[in-house]
Image: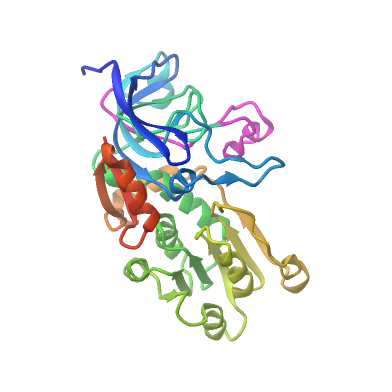
Amino acid sequence: MNIPKMMQAVRVYAPDDYRLEEIPLPEIGANEVLVRILATGICASDVKAWHGARVWGSAEIAPYIEPPVTAGHEFIGEVVALGPGAAAKYGLQIGDWAVSEQIVPCWECRFCKRGQYWMCQKHDIYGFKRGRAEGSWAEYMRFPANAINHKVPKDIPAVQAALIEPLACGIHTVERGDIQLGDVVVIAGMGPIGLCMLQVAKLKGPGLLIALDAKPKRLELARQLGADLAFDVHEGNAIQRVLDLTEGYGADVYIEATGAGPAVNQGLQMVRKLGTFVEFSVHAGPVAVDWSVIGDVKELNIHGSHLGPYSYPKAIQYLRNGVVNGAALVSHTLPLSEFHKGLEIAAQGDDSIKVVLVP
């Protein structure tokens, strides 16, 4: 394969300052992989970063993205070069399709040594932190030596294979919910990952699976993909409707995937005593809640969910065998040069589910 020396990439310099530029191809070393990007998705977190979101989870309120960096973390690529040792380490050959998990762990911190690599203290992460983990909104991309890579069957259409990362996140979130047979499960937020969660949650055998959103198109798709009920939170009292369906007790499991602050309080009111609340979303700012509801009133199980650890093989299998309907989730496909249009479509969200860029 004739590999060029230069490539097109979307470089991030500041909020709303994203530029399609020609940059050198990344060089690879030992245990590293170079892929040609076949398709790459636009995530809600990409939209938040574009709008200038900041991280509120530490003492310092830091930018959500560290420029300059190439954006993008949902992707599928074709292997075009392998550094020494990479073929044996990852079981990859030139021409294979591959995906790399979003986080690139250090493998040395407490969490990595315990197998909890997705919480790595010193990690890199594709598309957000400048350095060796540059993102996928480009013609080519490097998987660093510490990356976790997976071979992907070529019978999954490339634009659907770009859903592997968000689907893995959805799988992990559902597993954090510990859904039991017959449970009443509410998933708030029918964006791409919420719709992935919905389809995976269906596999757990819930007694009633309820989707919440404010966009009619997404609610209709949720019904098609397995929701027993789909409520528009702007029409009627969604909390009361769930209480009425459960003899006043509330849902057994509530998964928050909206990124909207009011959905957190909604969930605390909607979930039953001793129920489980799973928080997945990245919020643009802090969310205030009455913590006495969590403890004194309901003694809830509060679970966070981060990334998609140990879930990529399942995600690949589910897309391949149709357990998760990838075709239904890809609403827009655009060339990489139209990334600004893609961000605008994804930000509005009225007529879109997943926007995929094709270099």
Residue sitting nearer the eye, 152 or 269: 269
Q: Residue at x 46, y 36 (%)?
A: 101
Answer whether residue 117 is magenta in the image.
Answer: yes
Q: Residue at x 35, y 44 (%)?
A: 41
Image quarter of the C terminus:
top left
Relative vertical location of residue 290 with respect to residue 194 in this rendering, above or below: below
Q: Is residue 72 visible?
A: no
Answer whether residue 119 is magenta in the image.
Answer: yes
Residue sitting nearer the eye, 317 or 46: 46
Q: Which residues are magenta?
A: 94-123
Residue sitting nearer the eye, 178 or 24: 24
Report which quarter residue 63 is drawn in. top right
Residue lying at the far left in this picture: please name it.
Answer: 2
Residue 308 x/y as whole percent: 50, 45
Residue 136 x/y as whole percent: 37, 34
Q: How is the image coloured?
A: rainbow
Residue 162 x/y as whole percent: 34, 43
Q: Is residue 13 visible?
A: yes
Q: Residue at x 25, y 17 (%)?
A: 4
Residue 350 x/y as whole percent: 34, 63
Residue lying at the far right in this picture: please name it.
Answer: 296
Relative vertical location of residue 31 with respect to residue 97 in this rendering, above or below: above
Q: Residue at x 31, y 32 (%)?
A: 77
User: How many numbered marks are there?
Assistant: 0
Image quarter of the N terminus:
top left
